[in-house]
């Protein structure tokens, strides 16, 4: 299940829009192709987007012809701006670009800078993969043997270009012998749960039941959900968390039913510059994604439809945030600052 693979002068990606019907791979050699793939959700999930833009910037750098460092840096800025303009919510995207840009600022030999950028992109990928494995191991302790876990959207290897976040935690607990059952929400409008999480859970042989988003309350009210675990696209300093639309609804429902609600994310998803979730930019996508499913109209033509891609869950609904640095609980600001200082540079 390799979401993204660096092939030296191009990137191989699994086209996530074709799943589960087809396992189609794309080979992308231009940064513009990476940007389009992210926009179209062929590559998706916050950590995977971060990894992809790292490689995207490296590909852009390889195509720049000038040998003058200042001109090179100017052209590279344009590449970075194009990649940054793809999806506004995932913090990992901007963090990866900032890291790559810092590398580009050093040195006077353009060929060496290009190589350093490739090395940095590979390092971002490796570190993101390690972080997701580590947080999955830490988080697995929270899942009780015999429990049923509800998860939303897709947070496995394909969303992370690594091990997984929420799904990684479930996977670790399962691989260590805990008997678990999963409810996977279909995740309208783009069905990341039905198409991708179901595909991954099936391959991992983890028992699961696919439900529509609106069934969550029914199963919680019947006492059939022991905990909820989701990923994140951006987490503010106070722990408020932006994740796939519908996460907030699940968190409110979980609180009403006294069900623990966990968020799992690498520290690269945290944005300590934002005091609260109110400051997190929320991507608004095309209404066509709501009025159509896989290109087929399911609503009358010409109507209005809304399509915010994420919502923000206030910290008061979150039982704990699982990161590779440790499990953070209230007060989130202190824990976040501590792990950020210790683990991330
Ligand atoms: O719009 P998407 O499919 O990129 O949204 C993905 C999510 O919301 C995931 O839950 C989030 O990125 C965490 S992935 C490990």
Image (tube, rainbow, N blue to C red):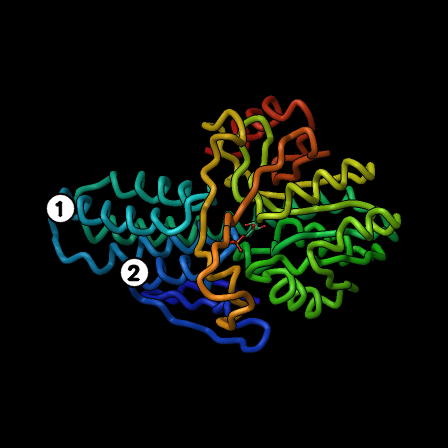
The residue identified by callout 2 is 32
Q: Earlier in the sequence, mark 2 or mark 1?
A: 2
Quarter of the figure with residue 88:
top left
Query: Could you tell me which quadrant the N terminus lies in?
Result: bottom right
Of the pair 269 and 327, the residue shown nearer to us: 269
Query: Could you tell me which quadrant the C terminus lies in?
Result: top left
Q: Residues within 10 Å of mark 2 (few under 14, many from 20)?
A: some
Residue at left offset 54%, top offset 77%: 22
The secondary structure type at the circle numbered 2 is helix
Q: Position of residue 137 (x, y in %)?
A: 70, 47
The residue identified by callout 1 is 71
Mark sitting on residue 169? none
Residue at left offset 70%, top offset 40%: 251
Is residue 66 shown left or right of residue 230?
A: left
Q: Position of residue 79 (x, y in %)?
A: 26, 51
Q: How much space separates mark 2 and mark 1, taking CA atoms?
A: 20 Å
């Amino acid at each position: 299940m390799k979401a993204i693979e660096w092939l030296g002068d191009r990137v191989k990606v699994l086209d996530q829009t074709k799943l589960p019907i087809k396992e189609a791979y794309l080979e992308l050699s231009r940064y513009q192709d990476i940007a389009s793939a992210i926009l179209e959700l062929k590559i998706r999930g916050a950590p995977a987007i971060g990894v992809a833009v790292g490689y995207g910037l490296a590909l852009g750098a390889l195509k720049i012809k000038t040998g003058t460092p200042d001109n090179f840096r100017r052209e590279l800025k344009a590449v970075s701006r194009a990649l940054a303009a793809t999806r506004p919510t995932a913090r990992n995207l901007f963090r990866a670009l900032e890291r790559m840009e810092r590398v580009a600022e050093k040195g006077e030999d353009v060929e060496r800078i290009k190589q350093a950028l490739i090395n940095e992109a590979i390092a971002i990928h490796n570190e993101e993969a390690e972080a997701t494995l580590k947080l999955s191991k830490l988080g697995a302790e929270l899942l009780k043997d015999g429990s049923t876990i509800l998860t939303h959207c897709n947070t496995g290897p394909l969303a992370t270009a690594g091990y997984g976040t929420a799904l990684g935690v479930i996977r670790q607990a399962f691989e260590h012998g805990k008997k678990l059952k999963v409810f996977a929400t279909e995740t309208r409008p783009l069905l990341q749960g039905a198409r991708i999480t179901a595909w991954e859970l099936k391959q991992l042989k983890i028992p699961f039941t696919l439900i529509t988003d609106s069934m969550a309350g029914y199963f919680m009210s019947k006492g059939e959900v022991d905990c909820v675990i989701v990923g994140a696209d951006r987490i503010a300093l106070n722990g408020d968390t932006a994740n796939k639309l519908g996460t907030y609804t699940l968190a409110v429902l979980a609180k009403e039913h006294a069900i623990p609600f966990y968020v799992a994310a690498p520290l690269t998803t945290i944005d300590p510059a934002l005091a609260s979730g109110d400051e997190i930019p929320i991507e608004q996508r095309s209404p066509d994604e709501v009025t159509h499913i896989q290109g087929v109209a399911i609503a009358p033509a010409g109507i209005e439809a809304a399509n915010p891609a994420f919502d923000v869950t206030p910290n008061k609904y979150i039982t704990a945030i699982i990161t590779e640095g440790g499990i953070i609980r209230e007060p989130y600001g202190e824990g976040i600052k501590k792990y950020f200082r210790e683990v991330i540079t």
